[in-house]
Amino acid sequence: MDEVKQNHIHAIEEEEEDEKTKMQMQMQIQTQKEKEREVEEWKKKFRALDKENHLLKNAIGALKEQMKEMEKQIVAKQEKSSSLSEQNDAEIATAIRKRKRQSVTAGAVTPKKLTQVPSLPMLSWDWIPIENEYVMGTLWKSIGATSVADTETVKIPQDFELLFRNPGMENEIEDAVNIKDTNEQEEGLLSNISVWREKHVREVLKQIPATPAQIRMCILDADDGKLGRDIIDKLLTIVPQTEEVKYVFHKVSALGVKISQLTDVEQFFYRLADIDLLEPKLRLWQCKHKFEDSLDEKYNELLILKNALMAIDKSENLRKILQIVLAFGNFLHAGVSRRSDNKAQYGVYGFHLESLKTLKTVKSHDKQSLTLLTYIYSYCKTNFPHALKVIDDLKTCHEATKLKGSVVYKNVMLAHEELIVFQRQLRKYRELKNKKNEEEKDGNKKTMNTNTNNKFEATMSSFNRRARESCRILLDIWNECSEVATRVAQEYDYEFTQNDSFEQLIQVFDDFMSDLKKARIDWETSQNQKEIQS
């Protein structure tokens, strides 16, 4: 008899080992399939990109052909326009000669004296005036000959001069005057900073809580604490241009103006003037800030997802309350099953997680009309109070239901693409720096701020290394989430409707916790009513 028992036990152990081996093989096969599926997806993406690249090349070729055709059309139109212009000039000259022959001169016409002339260069109007000696015998003589006492005299308003002035000509005249007065003005040097530019720079500076000197030091030190992303974005809109730097340096060195006598905008330009590759630095810094913000957001999403999955996986209270629910479910169905099949009285070992939603739909037939879930809560409160701590165990699930596993995975992959963008900006900055160093070396010029340049580049290089490590950590956390979700799904015989839809599994347990909280409220209400009645 003992030998039979031992054989039976050995048979059971062998079956269990076979089952474990089978499960391990299934998991390995599933993991391999997932890897193959992922490789296939990357292949599809590569083929799609390759196809898109081919289409872009074809489109570029077609555009080049169109541009050549358009250039030919433009040249043809210009030639045609030139011939028409020559024809019109000939017709106008003929008309003037004809008028000369027909005109009858009754005396010399006095030149028309203007009572109003502009003080600024004005825009031109492409009109064809009639020479004074040819207005005799026409209406223009009476129209143009207005007397001083005429109440109908046309007076040019003051705003007309401002509205229709020629800014380009105005700058040229002012530049000519300045060159004449100083005799030292450099070619191409600004006469002043435009009103609109000065106003814009001043408005932006008011929004930055730092002086120009402090801004300069923060840029040289690559101080992330004081120059955040918002400030970098604003600084990029007011970066001093080459002409503006020359203007301020000329004002200080050639004209002897003290720095304290410069305007706030000029002081800002002066303080930042000697920072090499200022705009490329700010562009690189801006890219760094964007990447950091993006990394933080993706990391937080992954942590929320991981915490929820780990809570489900490790909660012993969850397993206990599911065991209690299973016991009540077997009891409810034992009687019905016994009538049709005696073997059904043994019950089942588990149930699908979706069944948890229907616990609140079963109600008792007494006056209280308790739901099945409320009764189970009451039972746990009396017999297994620790099982109700599952509500606290799974409190992280609610926030995780707002995320989608597939989207989180895409964001993790996107982080690698964003890192590539930052690395491109860093390479571009290094190329510009090397080019500038070569030019200064050829011109025997010394590089300004060598130490701070090195510090800035060292800071960015250090961030590049940390960013690569951060991307690796993101991928590791995602793989851990995938591992835990797959294991939990297998433990509870849950099937995802699509790959990476881990939020569906979390949603099931979060809904169960929400229903359990409502059951707690119902139970507490019934207890209060009992106390009042007693």
Image (cartoon, grey):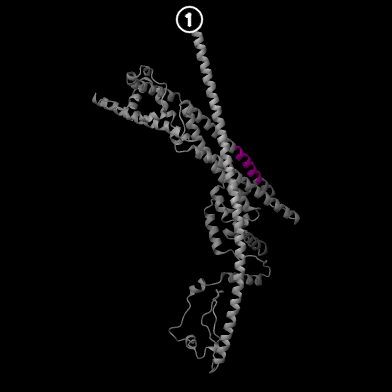
Q: Position of residue 414 (x, y in %)?
A: 56, 42
Quadrant in the rendering for residue 270:
bottom right
Q: Going 57% across and 83% down the picture, which residue do you hit? A: 92
- The residue to which callout 1 is attached is 1
Q: Position of residue 288 (x, y in %)?
A: 59, 45
| Viewer-nearest residue: 267 or 529 | 529
- Taking the image as shown, residue 230 lies to the left or right of residue 532, namely right
- Taking the image as shown, residue 230 lies to the left or right of residue 257, namely left
Q: Position of residue 127 (x, y in %)?
A: 54, 79
Residue furthest left as drawn: 533
Is residue 237 positioned above or below 51 on the image?
below
| Viewer-nearest residue: 308 or 273 | 308
Numbered label tally: 1
| Viewer-nearest residue: 504 or 239 | 504
Q: Going 51% across and 17% down the picture, which residue do you hit? A: 15
- Residue 517 belongs to magenta span: no
The quadrant of the image that shows the C terminus is top left
Q: Going 57% across and 33% down the picture, which residue do you hit? A: 35
Viewer can see residue 396: no
Q: Which residues are magenta?
A: 457-469
Q: Position of residue 29 (x, y in %)?
A: 55, 28
